């Protein structure tokens, strides 16, 4: 079964070579690239909603998913994205591979490189690990989350979800709330949203703000209701207990009372405001199920859908770049 001709023609017309060999930070992109990527991703959303969802743009290419940290949605999202574009996809599990036997990241990279993957999708607890790999391999590296540093495809999929809900993101006020200190999602979103002209606020307790937050160039609020006042988007972050060394919050109940998003607090945002969360959610800690599951306000399911489309756009565009480099 082949996809609708108009949809696949639209995708081919929007393809462009990625501006860099790798995607390790959103700072690899400039506003016109972001717009072009999101336009391409929009076309992939159409493809994904058809019964026939596969194209051959990555035919013959090998994509390796190398996830040193747990992941459900990101790994399966990249896997689906690669498969829908016709790539051969391999999921490496470093926990059961030689990495668990003490092989270093560099050894792993050199070994993998000998198998000639074209696209290497990496998640690692160490900030900067994908950049290190990028220097050692000949294909393209995509950062799927490195420590507390960046998660570029998450910020892109968040922006696509906002753009589809509101139109232009440049007019939006986005409040990013909760555990900012440990969040790579917050870092990538602040960088991408400010690049595209949105007004960004960080909202949370002082203990969960990064040390140099005053240099991030965005408003910081320590009162939830004030922080989300008039916001178009309230983006909740997971309390990242696995990254906390010691107690940053008195108790989960206390945290929910002051920082958990429920319908009462949401009333302070702009009428028509939307709620986002990158997942996985701690229900009843940073977000109430009544809000998370309310289709009138929640974009959380859209974020998951947009994730596959954005990753298809990134992979297709990186492959165009590889093609172009090989032709030179
Ligand atoms: N899934 C996102 C990440 O990998 C957010 C989270 O884990 O809270 O950073």
Image (cartoon, grey):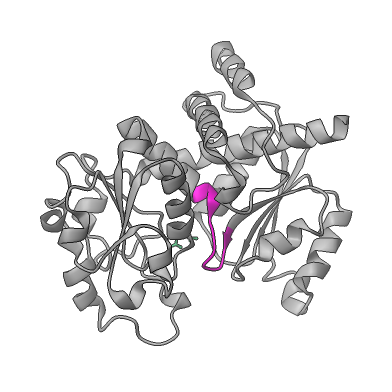
**Residue at the image point whose x is 42% and y is 47% from the top:** 194
Examine the rendering and report whether any part of residue 114 can be seen. yes
Give yes or no for residue 247 being in the magenta stretch: no
Lateral position of residue 239 relative to residue 71, left or right:
left
Q: Residue furthest top?
A: 6
Lateral position of residue 209 relative to residue 112, left or right:
left
Lateral position of residue 280 relative to residue 324, left or right:
left
Q: Residue 67: percent from the left, percent from the top?
A: 63, 61
**Residue at the image point whose x is 34% and y is 82% from the top:** 248
Q: Residue 29: percent from the left, percent from the top?
A: 58, 43
Whether 166 is drawn above or below 219: the answer is above
Q: Residue 188: percent from the left, percent from the top?
A: 49, 54
Whether 306 is drawn above or below 288: the answer is above
Q: Residue furthest bottom?
A: 246
Viewer-proximal residue among 197 and 99:
197
Viewer-proximal residue among 303 and 86:
303
Specify the quadrant of the image occupied by residue 36.
top right
Whether 75 is drawn above or below 14: the answer is below
Q: Which residues are magenta?
A: 145-154
What is the total number of numbered labels drawn onto the structure image? 0
Specify the quadrant of the image occupied by residue 249.
bottom left
Quarter of the image with the N terminus in it: top right
Examine the rendering and report whether any part of residue 3 can be seen. no
Viewer-proximal residue among 92 and 171:
171
Quarter of the image with the C terminus in it: top right
Give yes or no for residue 153 being in the magenta stretch: yes
Q: Residue 71: percent from the left, percent from the top?
A: 53, 60
């Amino acid at each position: 079964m082949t996809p609708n001709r108009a949809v696949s023609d639209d995708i081919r017309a929007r393809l462009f070579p990625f501006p860099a060999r790798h995607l390790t930070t959103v700072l690899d992109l400039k506003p016109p690239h972001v717009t072009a990527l999101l336009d391409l991703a929009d076309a992939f959303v159409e493809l994904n909603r058809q019964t026939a969802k596969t194209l051959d743009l990555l035919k013959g290419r090998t994509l390796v998913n190398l996830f040193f940290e747990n992941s459900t949605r990101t790994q399966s999202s990249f896997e689906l994205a690669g498969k829908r574009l016709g790539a051969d996809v391999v999921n490496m599990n470093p926990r059961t591979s030689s990495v668990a036997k003490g092989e270093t990241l560099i050894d792993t990279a050199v070994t993998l490189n000998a198998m000639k993957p074209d696209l290497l999708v990496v998640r690692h607890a160490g900030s900067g690990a994908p950049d290190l790999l990028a220097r050692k391999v000949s294909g393209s590296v995509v950062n799927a989350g490195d420590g507390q540093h960046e998660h570029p495809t998450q910020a892109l999929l968040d922006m696509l979800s906002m753009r589809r809900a509101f139109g232009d993101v440049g007019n939006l006020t986005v409040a990013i709330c909760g555990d900012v200190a440990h969040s790579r999602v917050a870092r990538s979103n602040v960088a991408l949203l400010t690049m595209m002209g949105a007004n960004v606020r960080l909202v949370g307790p002082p203990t969960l703000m990064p040390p140099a937050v005053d240099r991030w160039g965005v408003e910081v609020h320590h009162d939830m209701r004030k922080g989300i006042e008039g916001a178009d988007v309230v983006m909740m972050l997971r309390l990242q207990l696995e990254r906390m060394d010691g107690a940053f919050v008195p108790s989960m109940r206390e945290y929910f009372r002051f920082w958990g998003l429920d319908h009462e607090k949401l009333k302070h945002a702009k009428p028509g405001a939307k709620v986002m969360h990158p997942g996985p959610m701690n229900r009843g800690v940073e977000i109430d199920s009544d809000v998370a599951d309310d289709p009138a306000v929640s974009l959380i399911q859209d974020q998951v859908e947009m994730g596959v489309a954005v990753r298809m756009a990134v992979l297709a565009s990186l492959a165009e770049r590889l093609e172009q480099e090989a032709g030179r």
